[in-house]
Image (cartoon, grey):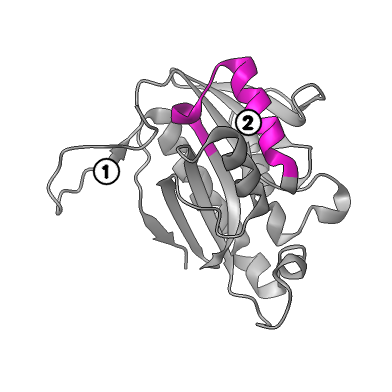
Amino acid sequence: MGLFDRKRTTFDSVAPLYTVGNVKTILIIGLGNPGAEYAGNRHNLGFLVLDKYHSSHDFSGWVTKKDLGCELATGQIGSTRVLLAKPTTFMNNSGESAQKLQKFYRVYNPGTVVVHDELDIDFRTIRTRTGGGSAGHNGIKSITDQLGEDYGRVRIGIGPKTNAKMDSADFVLQDFSTEQQELLPKLINEACSLLDEATTGILPEHTVTVD
């Protein structure tokens, strides 16, 4: 049973299209690069969301787990045990940590959500789904190589590039613009709301635009 299991509903129903299966533990992985020099980068948006989510709930402090290649915090939201993980393997090897976490905690793809930036989605926009390609995101490619495609994703837009000729790797490793930083807290809060839905049993597959 996948994380986003389609309910039988009419097209115009207000009910969410997807519900989380009978998952008692959820693993939420935020993607980014460790180190102060990367902290404000667009590519660290997954870390920024997890930091906010961590501070908004009663989680344990962040603990460095060298054997699992991550910073880890644990907590209980309702009846669901929630594991927050920020891989310390650097972005391109995020799958190494994800695979170790799943194996150690016996949480597999139906109970895994990955939060990450996506250049192919415009800034202000968040999309959720299960599966799909990497869209050139090396962190997602690494995780998919290790886990397969059928895990949940919270995809937060950072595009388009301000200079079409700029190399994508350079763009994602830049900090957010001053204008974007003003809206960033709202974007992060919306992503956290989607994570709350996952932990309570419902995470709709849809698109959210933040004004």
Question: Which percent across, then down, holds residue 198?
Answer: 43, 35
Q: What residue sits 67% from the left and 66% below the top?
A: 181
Q: Main secondary structure of the magenta part?
A: helix
Q: Earlier in the sequence, mark 1 or mark 2?
A: 1
Residue 135 at x, y percent in the picture: 55, 59
- Please name the amino acid that badge 2 sits on: Leu
In the image, 205: left or right of 63? left
Q: Nearer the viewer, residue 40 or 34?
A: 34
Is 125 part of what is drawn in magenta?
no
Residue at the (60%, 47%) spot, across then down: 140
Name the quadrant of the N terminus.
top left
Nearer the observer, 192 or 18: 18
How many marks on residues?
2
Judged left or right of residue 10, residue 84 is right
Q: Nearer the viewer, residue 40 or 165?
A: 165
Give the residues in magenta: 93-113
Circle 2 is placed at which residue position? 84
For the residues labelled 1 and 2, say whether their Cβ atoms are less than 8 Å apart.
no
Tell me, for residue 16, which label it has, or none: 1
Indicate left or right for 149 with 43 as reference.
left
Q: Is residue 56 visible?
A: no
For label 2, the SS is strand
Q: Residue at x 16, y 38 (%)?
A: 8
**Structural distance between the alpha carbons of marks 1 and 2:** 24 Å
On the question of residue 79 being in view, the answer is: yes
Q: Position of residue 139 (x, y in %)?
A: 66, 48
Residue 171: mark in rendering: none
Residue 103 colored in magenta in the image = yes
Kind of residue indicated by mark 1: Pro
Identify the residue at horizontal 86%, vertical 46% (top origin).
Answer: 35
